[in-house]
Amino acid sequence: MNAPLLRTRGLGMRFGGLQAVADLDLETWPGEILGLIGPNGAGKSTTFNLIAGAMRPTSGVIEFDGHAMVGRPTHDFARRGIMRTFQHNKPFESMSLADNVKVGMHTRLPLSLWQVLAAAPATQSVEAKAARRAEELLEFVGLGEWVHADVGTLSFGQGRLLEIARALAGEPRLILFDEPAAGLTAAECERLAGIIGRIAAQGIAVLLIEHDMRFLMALAHRVAVLNFGRKIADGTPAEVQAHADVVRAYLGNVEALSNA
Ligand SMILES: Nc1ncnc2c1ncn2[C@@H]1O[C@H](COP(=O)(O)OP(=O)(O)OP(=O)(O)O)[C@@H](O)[C@H]1O
Ligand SMILES: [Mg+2]
């Protein structure tokens, strides 16, 4: 716990004339849930794209487990254990849930994705292990009954849980959730909060973007606030909610904060 797992310094992303992320210093520790909040367009998803290696920053440093990551290929980020879920679900339709989860394992298994899915004889023990692990993960997110079901039969909320199982299949050390509660019912939100809490309790670092302040403030150990790409506050949920700049950034939406 004495060194952060992820550390960014002076991280910046410029799109033409737009500075979407500016001079951002972030740190996350194993087992910690760090909330990332800010108004629409504040640069939260862009920050995730940088940390997941999907975009190369125009300035700054990303260290993961002591390794300098900027400039490495995207799959290196996944291989080191940085996994994400997306703001919009992207399941592979017409595949079973178990196969969708196995797709998430291919960053770790010593086999290509197609070998895993085709289960050639030489790969059968690996395939059996992968199938067991997929089942375990689907049970962990509460989809144990639907292991062999087709993804097309899932509700929206179940699709979200499947995406989490798929991210966990890559054995993350850091997992990035981009608005996981969006579109979920109150009961589904409660279940999701439990799952995220149990993920962190396993020692996985969690970075959580969420507009639902009640959900986020109850779950996060620490919260960083972005506004126009810059971090304007970083502290416990109570500290951040009392921060004048944060209230100002949310002006017109102060209710969202006081709801928490
Ligand atoms: N690929 C891109 N090319 C150009 N501009 C982009 C790109 N991605 C994001 N932006 C811009 O960067 C800014 C930050 O966007 P980003 O999606 O990171 O915000 P956000 O905080 O996730 O917002 P939201 O809460 O609406 O999801 C916005 O002005 C957005 O239009
Ligand atoms: Mg976003």
Image (cartoon, helix red, strand yellow):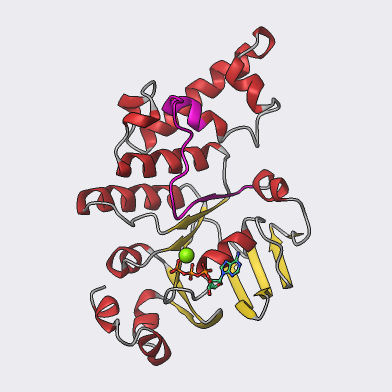
Asked if residue 17 lies in the magenta stretch, the reply is no
Residue 175 visible: yes
Compared across the picture, whether 67 is left or right of 148 comes to right
Residue 84 vertical placement versus 59 (above, below) = above
**Residue 152's x, y, as percent?**
36, 30
Which residue sits at x=30%, y=86%?
Answer: 252
Compared across the picture, whether 116 is left or right of 191 comes to right
Q: Which of the 4 image quadrants contains residue 164?
A: top left
Which residue sits at x=64%, y=27%?
Answer: 113
**Residue 16's x, y, as percent?**
68, 76
Quadrant location, the C terminus? bottom left
Q: Nearer the viewer, residue 116 or 110?
A: 116
Asked if residue 85 lies in the magenta stretch, the reply is yes
Residue 238 vertical placement versus 172 (above, below) = below
Which residue sits at x=68%, y=47%?
Answer: 80
Q: Which of the 4 image quadrants contains residue 106?
A: top right
Q: Residue furthest front?
A: 16
Residue 5 visible: no
Q: Nearer the viewer, residue 218 or 114?
A: 114
Which residue sits at x=38%, y=90%?
Answer: 248
Magenta stretch: give its range. 81-101
